[in-house]
Image (tube, helix red, strand yellow):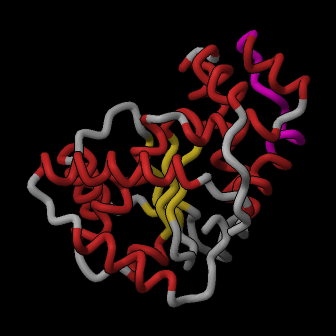
Amino acid sequence: MISICRPLAYAQSLARAIPIETERELGAKLAPQVIAALGGRPRGKPILCTAAPGTRALERILAAIGAQDVTLSVVDLPIKNALALPGGQLLLFRGLIDFAQSPEEIAGVLAHEVGHVTHRHSLELFIENAGTAALIGLLVGDVTGGTALAGMAQFILQASYQREAEREADQYALTQLGAAGIDAAPLALLFDRLAAKAPEPGG
């Protein structure tokens, strides 16, 4: 991933000024753009995994870690990654599920990403890099058009959160996992194994 500098103060301030409904609309429109940027629809396969047993298992994990107002989509791509987008949109890729060695590892990843959602880190990242017209649109409740969103989707796949945001997400994950009685150690093991692999889009 490409590291970025510490968020500017205005990004944090503007994030607080944007209505949550607008942020959710933004995230709902960004999610398919991000998926398309990563390869679109595999030949002959649906892009989203919706098998009932797996869906129920992930819903139980989200409930256990106290996740609220999130929409989880499992993307049928062999990418070892998960992403938090504005408005509580979470993308979990099949490659990461296949790579994980225990449910606790997946629970840790989801708790970390929910931490980014809770602190609105993805929205701050968007604000930092969106054009003036897009920012004005967000402030008045008008989400930007498809072309601009496609460009932001590409940026999201190359950018990374700054260290403070990652620490906040880590702390949130540790707190929620502890409250749920889920061992947090497997999450560190997963990150170690991922770090030993080639970087994935989005990091």
Q: Position of residue 76 (x, y in %)?
A: 53, 69
Q: Quadrant of the C terminus?
A: bottom right
Residue plotted at (78% across, 54% down):
155
Q: Dividing the picture into quarters, in which one does residue 144 lie? A: top right
Judge from the rendering whether residue 93 lies leftward or rightward of residue 191; answer left or right: right
Q: Nearer the viewer, residue 167 or 61?
A: 167
Q: Is residue 50 magenta?
A: no
Q: Position of residue 75 (x, y in %)?
A: 53, 63
Judge from the rendering whether residue 187 lies leftward or rightward of residue 31; answer left or right: left
Q: Nearer the viewer, residue 75 or 3?
A: 3
Residue plotted at (23% across, 59% down):
57
Residue projecting furthest to the left: 181
Question: Does residue 178 lie above or below 104 as drawn?
Answer: above
Q: Quadrant of the N terminus?
A: bottom right
Residue plotted at (54% across, 89% down):
197
Q: Is residue 143 magenta?
A: yes
Q: Nearer the viewer, residue 76 or 166?
A: 166
Number of residue marks = 0
Q: Which residues are magenta?
A: 140-149
Q: Position of residue 184 (x, y in %)?
A: 22, 65
Q: Position of residue 89 (x, y in %)?
A: 52, 42
Judge from the rendering whether residue 170 lies leftward or rightward of residue 22; answer left or right: left
Question: Does residue 13 lie above or below 78 as drawn?
Answer: above
Residue plotted at (61% across, 26% down):
23
Q: Main secondary structure of the magenta part?
A: loop
